[in-house]
Amino acid sequence: MDHLGHRLDSTGKQEHDCNMARGAFIRQTMEILNMFEFASPEQKLIAIQLYCCAWYGSTLWNLYGTAAGKVYRLWSTTSKLAHNLDRRTHTYFIDHFLIGSLPNVKQMIFRRYVKFVQTLNESNNSVIWSLAKLASNTVKSCTGLNIRNIEDEFKLNPLIEHPQNFSVKKCDLLPDEIENIELLQYLLHIRSNETDDEEIHSEINQLITNLCIK
């Protein structure tokens, strides 16, 4: 059943709604990438965050469920597509270079969730306040379970800490990975400025692919 744009399931779970949001994001992302084909990868990613990342309904999801995990991984795939890289590209390239200063999908959703539960728990409406307190204080509710898991992951209380303090940790870099990132940056620069010779362009693409998946 649909209600206010949410897909409600008889089980009380929001996995289906989460999967629908994932599908919508994929469709919208492909439209943006096609529309801004002329733009730089950085401009494409900014456009995608502006037009495709509302994540309406994500405050009802189990943020640590299987369906939500698939949503978080979308940003990695999107970054690869925006840079025209192989889908097998290692994660550290994404986290430490390709997305620049942009937050990933998981961080966006978590920060919005923290703001949402804080707003409910600070509501002046006694009914909303009471229900929010009840849901927040038991792991039998999706809300309480999310709050407990967020606190365990970030070592911060999501009911009192500022949402911006919840930053998703990036993987640590090894020395050779730092060198690989610098080399990828150099190769991407050459590729973006070498468009006349198709053979050279093909060779550069092969070098980039080999670097990203080795």
Image (cartoon, helix red, strand yellow):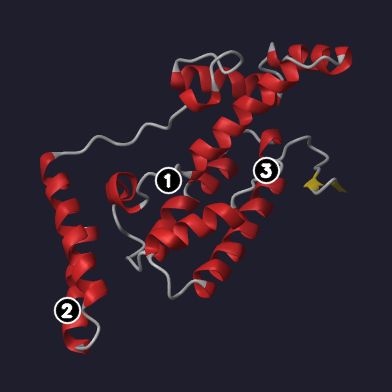
- Look at the image and tell me in which quarter the C terminus lies: bottom left
Residue 18 lies, in percent from the top left, at: 66, 46
Quadrant assignment, res 87: bottom left
**Dot 3 corresponds to which residue?**
15
Q: CA distance from mark 2 to mark 1?
A: 30 Å
Residue 56 lies, in percent from the top left, at: 70, 45
107 left or right, relative to 27? left
| Label 2 or label 1, whichever comes before in sequence order | 1
Residue 82 lies, in percent from the top left, at: 41, 64
Front-most of 101 and 90?
101
Q: What residue sits 74% from the left and 21% below the top? A: 120
**Dot 2 corresponds to which residue?**
203
Above or below, 98 against 37 in this view is: above
| Label 1 or label 3, whichever comes before in sequence order | 3
Q: Secondary structure at mark 3?
A: helix
Circle 2: residue type: Glu
| In this rendering, the label closer to the viewer, 1 or 3 | 1
| Label 3 or label 2, whichever comes before in sequence order | 3
Q: What residue sits 51% from the left and 17% below the top? A: 151
82 left or right, relative to 195? right
34 left or right, relative to 88? right
Front-most of 93 and 32?
32
Quadrant assignment, res 95: top left
Circle 1: residue type: Leu
| In this rendering, the label closer to the viewer, 3 or 2 | 2
Q: Secondary structure at mark 2?
A: helix
Count residues near mark 2 (Cα–Cα under 10 Å), then give few for <14, some for 14-19, many for 20+.
few
**Dot 1 corresponds to which residue?**
102
Above or below, 49 against 109 in this view is: below
Residue 63 visible? The answer is no
